[in-house]
Amino acid sequence: MANVAVIGSQWGDEGKGKIVDWLSSRADVVVRFQGGHNAGHTLVIDGIEYKLHLLPSGIVRKGKLSVIGNGVVVDPWALLREIETVRAKGVEITPKNLVLAGNATLILPVHAVLDEAMETLRGQKSIGTTKRGIGPAYEDKVARRAVRVCDLEEPEYLKEQISRMMEHHNALLRGLGLAEMEAEKIYRALLEIREEILAYRGRSWQVLDEARKAGKRILFEGAQGTMLDVDHGTYPFVTSSNTVAAQAASGSGVGPGTINYVLGITKAYTTRVGEGPFPTELTDETGEHLGARGHEFGTTTGRKRRCGWFDAALVRQSVKMSGIRGIALTKLDVLDGLKEIKICTGYELDGQMIDYLPSSTTRQARVKPVYQTLEGWSENTRGARSWAQLPAAAVKYVRYIEELIEAPVAMLSTSPERDDTILMRDPFL
């Protein structure tokens, strides 16, 4: 049986919640491997809605083990609040079904303060962060001054580590004209929740290795999207972690050979939240139409998403960078009723044709989309559960996408409802 990594192939918000829910019902273990509580998945199970930010999607299903891997940055207070919120809806959460990697980095109150201060300082050139401290926490991790979950086990070391970290951060706060923060206050706040957090602490790499050897199905659940990857995305308008499929291994403590299949969640059009280049963005009535029909507002922030035509060049790039073997195409029904639909097949840059999105920030801003126009369809595709229920023009659109991105459609979603899915290939088989 295969182990599956699920990643977004665009700028996030591709509809991973429904697909991950569908897959988590078939998995034994579900792992979060990057990001923090800046990401979110919305699940609807038996009429109950769950909005998850740090907890893996398997947590809402009995008999599943959920793992928060070392690649995640964890706000411990946000985690405890989320646990209580989900528990209030009747879900049992204990150390038996939730494991938190001991070597995961903690997000502390100073990180959110710095995040907001730096974003304000950027002014009109802001990156568009969620101001939740994700970036500063990753900075501390790379700079080797972070506080990790395992540090809570050693109070004296914890106190020393916070003190060293705050020497750096208070100097920065002074430089920004902001009030310094007391290391002692942060230390005492952590001691208050220390036992609650440590109850979930475990050796996630060992837990996953044992699951692998036992033949259990493991689902690696990504957050955000490939084009928000800190290395491969539209830098600097990216998140602070790697979002490509390779991070599933390093962010959870398993070897790359553990991952047998990479599924790329892909929206039938394109959206983006926040700042940064967006070659196919539509600022006209069509863009408003897509946003309205698709209910394009972020799960975590509620921010309105920018909308545009499907960018096949961008998704093809994601396919190659993450080794995507198949895509789950979502929200096809949002395109119902459009007389014509455009697909970006490449770009024009300074008079030359290219078939990739450049790494250069300035060149990304200058590319112009090259479109192929297809006939739309007037029929309703919402709720379709077989190819026979789709209009011919919709089938043609999907097949053309497969050809352009050089990857097959493994799953096709036609509504937010779990069973409104056309399955061509079960990624676990």
Image (cartoon, grey):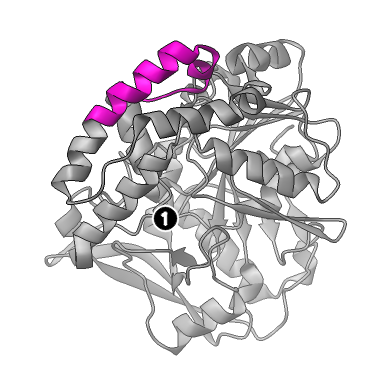
Q: Nearer the viewer, residue 47 or 113?
A: 113
Which residue appears at 45% of the width and 44% of the height?
319
- Image coordinates of residue 74 in percent, x first then y, are 51, 35
Residue 317 seen in this snapshot: no
**Compared with residue 253, is residue 247 higher up or lower down, i.e. above or below?**
below
Residue underneath mark 1: 130
Residue 105 visible within the image: yes
Measuring from the top left, give residue 416's x and y in whole percent: 72, 64
Instruction: Using the image, determine if residue 228 lies above or below residue 160.
Output: below
| Left or right: 263, with 59 as reference point | left
Say which quarter of the image contains residue 192.
Answer: top right
Q: Which residues are magenta?
A: 144-167
Q: Dividing the picture into quarters, in which one does residue 369 lie?
A: bottom left
Within 10 angstroms of label 1, few (less than 14), some, or many (20 or more) residues? many
Secondary structure mostly seen in magenta is: helix
Taking the magenta stretch, the answer to whether it contains residue 292 is: no
Residue 262 spot, x, y in % from top left: 57, 36
Residue at 61%, 51% (x, y): give it. Answer: 16
- Which one is in front, 250 or 186? 186
The image quadrant that residue 415 belongs to is bottom right
In the image, 194 versus 215, the foreground residue is 194
Question: Can you say whether 295 is above or below 56 in the image?
Answer: below
In magenta segment, residue 157: yes
